[in-house]
Amino acid sequence: MSEDRIDETRRLYDTVAHTYAEVLPDTRYEAPLELGMLDHFIAHLPDSDLPVLDAGCGTGRMLHYLSAREVSPLVGIDLSPEMIGHARASNPGVPVETGDLRTLPHADSSIRAVLCWYAVIHSSKTDVAAIVREVGRVLIPGGTVLFGFQAGTGERVVERAYGHDVTLHGVLHETREFVPWLNDAGFEVTATADRGPVGFERNSQGFILARRR
């Protein structure tokens, strides 16, 4: 992703943060498949006192989901300062900060699991591969990662989101594309799932769970 595209994404989410938090306060719009993948991820967390990272935590709704299921400790990171402000307010006591998923501010082998839930939907293929490598760097051996993303091929331009006129580029990824990225970063894939669009969705959805070797 070019720096201009990163700035575009940051500005968009800063603009829509308040409305986003109102429209998507929790997981009410997640389909049963998504919730099943999330609960499978939680059920197979490695036994460690190290934190679970919500990479691309947005307003913190998934931090709340994890916390409600007694997952701790938690940490979060997101590109948008305004989204982080909402995450901090809705998850008191959970350390959250702004940052780039390609250069995580965490030491090697300092995280036991990573949830990357729809955080790569604006990222190029090159950047997703870099994010996967960075996740592999911060995870402990045996650590797990779950990616959720909009599935398909090509890009799309969003011109209105959450009640605001915007310009935002979305990138679709195929589940099979993640397999070599994960393998090259030292992971083994343990589960994948895909589903077609439902309701107001325009795109299919993909999910992939992997364990660090």
Image (cartoon, grey):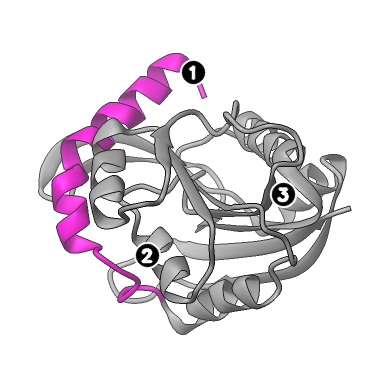
Which amino acid, by three-letter code, is at mark 3? Glu
Q: Amino acid at mark 2?
A: His
Q: Main secondary structure of the magenta part?
A: helix
* Residue, disc 3: 177
User: What's the amino acid at mark 1?
Assistant: Ser
In this rendering, would 116 be left or right of 77? right
Residue 162 is one of the magenta-drawn residues: no
Please state the horizontal and vertical placement of residue 3, each as a whole percent of the image: 45, 15
Which numbered disc flags the more N-terminal residue, 2 or 1? 1
Mark number for residue 64?
2
Instruction: State which region is magenta.
Output: 1-30
Identify the disc placed on residue 190.
none
Tell me the residue that label 1 is attached to: 2
Q: Is 28 located above or below residue 161 in the figure? A: below
Write down the quadrant of residue 199 in the picture. Answer: bottom left
Give the CA separation, mark 3 to mark 1.
Answer: 21 Å
Residue at x 42% of width, y 59% of height = 63
129 horizontally vs 124: left or right: right
Position of residue 36 measured from the top left corner of the image (x, y, whole percent): 55, 81
Q: Residues within 10 Å of mark 2 (few under 14, many from 20)?
A: many
Q: Residue at x 46, y 29 (%)?
A: 99
So how many labels did they put on this image?
3
Which numbered disc, 3 or 1, marks the residue that appears first in the sequence?
A: 1
